[in-house]
Image (cartoon, rainbow, N blue to C red):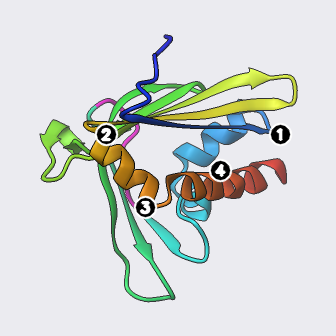
């Protein structure tokens, strides 16, 4: 499915990862692996829920400087296509419950590439203001950092 990018409300990120899609898929869908790369180091990640089905919960917690784990993401999976695509949103929580503070919907796509896998994220926001806030929060650095952490994890396997 081809999606058009709304430059006023969307952000995108892509990277070629020198590993097969199946390795990246496992890193996304196995809690112990996801915890190794999902949040920029040195912060730590804890996966509280990873229900890989439409309507399933996607909940992570983070710890900075070894402190207590605090909420990071409370989202709902919208679509799962094995080894190909993960779509989630924090506009809903698990079980299709409306969220208090909707912010984004993310589409993660994995496609074969001559050097491994074309890894792409298309992140949609409800307004230009939310998009700008995500940029200010460090979207490019943050998503780039976690993609690099993901690449290190799967390229070593």
Where in the figure is residue 56, as x and y percent of width and height?
30, 39
Left or right placement of residue 34 versus residue 18 in this view? left
Do labels 3 and 4 touch, CB within 8 Å?
no
Left or right placement of residue 132 versus residue 35 in this view? left
Where in the figure is residue 99, as x and y percent of width and height?
15, 48
Query: Does residue 11 sit above or below 138 in this rendering?
Result: above
The magenta segment is 47-54
- Indicate which disc, 1 or 2, sits on the residue closer to the N terminus: 1
Which quadrant holds residue 14? top right
Left or right placement of residue 131 versus residue 25 in this view? left
Where in the figure is residue 87, as x and y percent of width and height?
41, 32
Q: Which mark is residue 137?
A: 3
Residue bearing mark 2: 128
Callout 2: helix, strand or loop?
helix
Callout 1: helix, strand or loop?
loop
Q: Nearer the viewer, mark 2 or mark 4?
A: 2
Do labels 2 and 4 touch, CB within 8 Å?
no
Residue at image coords 82%, 48%: 155
Residue at image coords 74%, 50%: 151
- Indicate which disc, 3 or 1, sits on the residue closer to the N terminus: 1
Residue bearing mark 1: 18
Q: Which mark is residue 147?
A: 4
Do labels 3 and 2 touch, CB within 8 Å?
no
Q: Nearer the viewer, mark 1 or mark 2?
A: 2
Residue at image coords 45%, 52%: 135
């Amino acid at each position: 499915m081809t999606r058009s990018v709304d430059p006023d409300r969307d952000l995108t990120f892509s990277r070629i990862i020198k590993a097969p899609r199946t390795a990246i898929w496992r890193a996304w869908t196995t809690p112990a692996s996801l915890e190794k790369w999902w949040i920029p180091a040195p912060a730590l990640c804890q996966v509280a829920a990873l229900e890989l089905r439409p309507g399933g919960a996607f909940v992570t917690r983070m710890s900075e400087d070894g402190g207590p784990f605090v909420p990071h993401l409370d989202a709902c999976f919208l679509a799962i296509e094995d080894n190909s695509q993960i779509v989630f949103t924090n506009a809903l929580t698990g079980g299709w419950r409306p969220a208090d503070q909707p912010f984004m919907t993310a589409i993660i796509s994995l496609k074969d590439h001559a050097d491994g896998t074309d890894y792409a994220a298309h992140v949609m926001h409800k307004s230009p203001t939310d998009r700008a806030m995500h940029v200010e929060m460090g979207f490019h650095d943050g998503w780039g950092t976690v993609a690099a952490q993901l690449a290190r994890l799967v390229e070593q396997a």
